Image (spheres, helix red, strand yellow):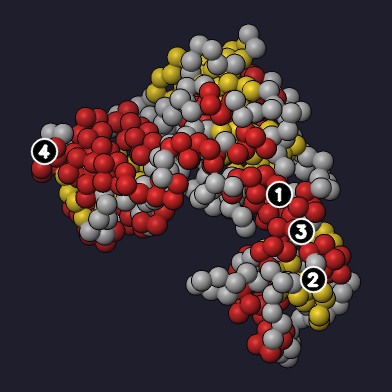
């Protein structure tokens, strides 16, 4: 990770050491005072709900060697001047966010690792998880954690890499055109993976064409000596390929894919097995997580891993041990015998349909129950997109549907319109009401899918089910 003095930091970011030892050495950077470990730099980021300048003392007491601030007034100075407070260097800058970006850009220039950028409407994190698994433990890899795929998270991810890092994997989200270009200016990916183009951020961008233009910025930013990995089964990929200066590897299920997943089957728990083929070789893969759609994310990861020198047989074996990030198709069995699929991290029409199909694929001695909440940022498509998900649920054979949130009520209406019995559909106003409904509805042997946009907080429903006594 980044390791420099406070004085050098100030020089890089156009700031000034205004207090504390200028020769203080920082190792690593963070914007959350609760995540500070001794030796780090704390960037006091101003925000709408909280101001990092109010947490300078907490960061210093947690061991921050340097704090980066955009104001050094009495309130900030007093936090560092209290009895027993450790001596911490203070770097004053015009803009803390810009200082973080400048430091990451400088640090990226010192790295010699391979950098893989990943974007797409869905599947970014799963693709990252599969790529980490495929690369194996013998390679030193740094990858995006949590939701750190934006203008603050990408610099923090880059700053975690160091001289011994072999591969840096950077997820790149966006909320408007030009944002991925700016993120690429920080991470400078040699390889770029686009998972798909779907109806996310419609409220902000207005059309799938605009979404494709924004996601395609990664394709444009990959240099000619690098490589772009595109989903051969996504209708937008051909237009994206026209924007590439680097060679392209196609992945998917189609016959023309360079890296292909075929002969997909699922077991009683919805876990897919498939044949992975590339370069005239093939290997059978069995994934430990449910969802046919993971054949795509596996193929994308395999394509990148092959480019990075991993043999196909090794990739197939390692994918069988993949560890998926929290709240993404995680399967738990509660003490009362109910199986829970926690996919509550986020939701879009594409990922909702995939999750519903996964639940429908699962065998159970009880009922299959879909607990679905609002999908955010769909703009003018909000009403129709939710209604169509309800139709998908009704057609899938899922026995019960519980919705939560005002938008998700349209999911319930779509299910009813498509013929799902009214006794099987329970629209709820919030998480608490949905949890109470599930308390009465669920029985041992049932399988429950829980999914919504992150803002809905449906992980609370998962927690309540798992806390239920046998």
What whole-number distance in Å separates the C-alpha atoms at marks 2 and 4?
Answer: 65 Å
What whole-number distance in Å separates the C-alpha atoms at marks 4 and 3?
Answer: 58 Å
> Which residue is at a point 26% across and 46% down the rendered structure image?
383
Tell me the element at label 4: loop
Q: Quick one: label 1 or label 2, which is nearer the N terminus?
A: 2
* Residue under pointer 3: 103
* Residue under pointer 4: 421
Q: Quick one: label 4 or label 3, which is nearer the N terminus?
A: 3
Q: Quadrant of the N terminus?
A: bottom right
Quadrant in the picture for residue 199: top left
Q: Are marks 1 and 2 in contact (CB under 8 Å)?
A: no
* Residue under pointer 2: 15
What whole-number distance in Å separates the C-alpha atoms at marks 1 and 4?
Answer: 52 Å
| In the rendered image, the vertical position of residue 256 relative to residue 127, given as above or below | above
Tell me the element at label 2: loop
Drawn side of residue 412 relative to residue 35, left or right:
left
Viewer-side label of 2, 4: 2
Task: Name the residue furthest left.
Answer: 422
What whole-number distance in Å separates the C-alpha atoms at marks 2 and 3?
Answer: 11 Å
Q: How many marks?
A: 4
How would you rate the neighbour count of disc 4 (Cα within 10 Å): few for under 14, some for 14-19, many for 20 or more? few
Q: Quick one: label 1 or label 4, which is nearer the N terminus?
A: 1
């Amino acid at each position: 990770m980044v390791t420099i003095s406070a004085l050098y930091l100030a020089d890089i970011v156009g700031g000034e050491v205004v207090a504390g030892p200028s020769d203080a050495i920082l190792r690593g950077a963070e914007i959350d005072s609760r995540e500070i470990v001794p030796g780090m730099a704390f960037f006091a980021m101003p925000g709408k709900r909280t101001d990092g300048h109010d947490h300078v003392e907490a960061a210093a007491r947690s061991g921050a060697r340097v704090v980066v601030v955009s104001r050094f007034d009495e309130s900030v100075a007093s936090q560092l001047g209290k009895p027993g407070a450790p001596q911490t260097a203070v770097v004053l800058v015009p803009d803390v966010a810009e200082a973080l970006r400048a430091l990451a850009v400088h640090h990226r220039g010192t790295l010699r690792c391979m950098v893989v950028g990943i974007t797409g409407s869905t599947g970014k994190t799963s693709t990252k998880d599969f790529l980490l698994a495929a690369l194996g433990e013998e390679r030193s890899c740094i990858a995006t954690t949590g939701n750190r795929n934006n203008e603050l998270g990408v610099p923090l991810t880059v700053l975690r890499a160091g001289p011994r890092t072999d591969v840096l994997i950077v997820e790149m989200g966006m909320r408007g055109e030009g944002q991925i270009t700016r993120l690429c200016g920080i991470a400078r990916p040699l390889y770029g993976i686009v998972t798909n183009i779907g109806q996310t951020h419609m409220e902000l961008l207005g059309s799938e064409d605009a979404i494709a233009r924004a996601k395609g910025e990664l394709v444009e930013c990959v240099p000619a000596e690098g490589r772009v990995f595109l989903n051969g089964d996504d209708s937008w990929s051909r237009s994206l390929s026209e924007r590439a200066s680097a060679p392209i590897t196609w992945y998917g299920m189609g016959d023309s894919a360079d890296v292909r997943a075929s002969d997909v089957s699922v077991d009683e728990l919805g876990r897919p097995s498939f044949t992975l083929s590339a370069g005239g070789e093939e290997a059978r893969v069995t994934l430990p997580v449910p969802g046919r759609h993971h054949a795509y994310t596996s193929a994308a990861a395999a394509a990148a891993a092959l480019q990075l020198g991993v043999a196909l047989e090794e990739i197939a074996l390692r994918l069988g041990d993949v560890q998926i990030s929290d709240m993404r198709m995680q399967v738990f069995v509660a003490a009362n015998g109910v199986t829970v699929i926690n996919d509550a991290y986020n939701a879009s029409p594409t990922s909702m349909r995939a999750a519903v199909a996964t639940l429908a694929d699962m065998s159970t001695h009880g009922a299959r129950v879909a607990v679905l909440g609002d999908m955010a940022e769909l703009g003018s498509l909000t009403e129709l997109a939710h209604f169509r998900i309800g139709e998908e649920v009704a057609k899938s054979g899922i026995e019960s549907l519980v919705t939560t949130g005002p938008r998700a009520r349209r999911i319930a209406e779509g299910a009813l319109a498509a013929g799902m019995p009214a006794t099987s559909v329970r629209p709820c106003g919030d998480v608490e009401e949905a949890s109470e409904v599930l308390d009465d509805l669920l029985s041992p042997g049932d399988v429950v899918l829980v999914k919504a946009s992150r803002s809905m907080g449906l992980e609370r429903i998962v927690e309540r089910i798992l806390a239920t006594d046998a």
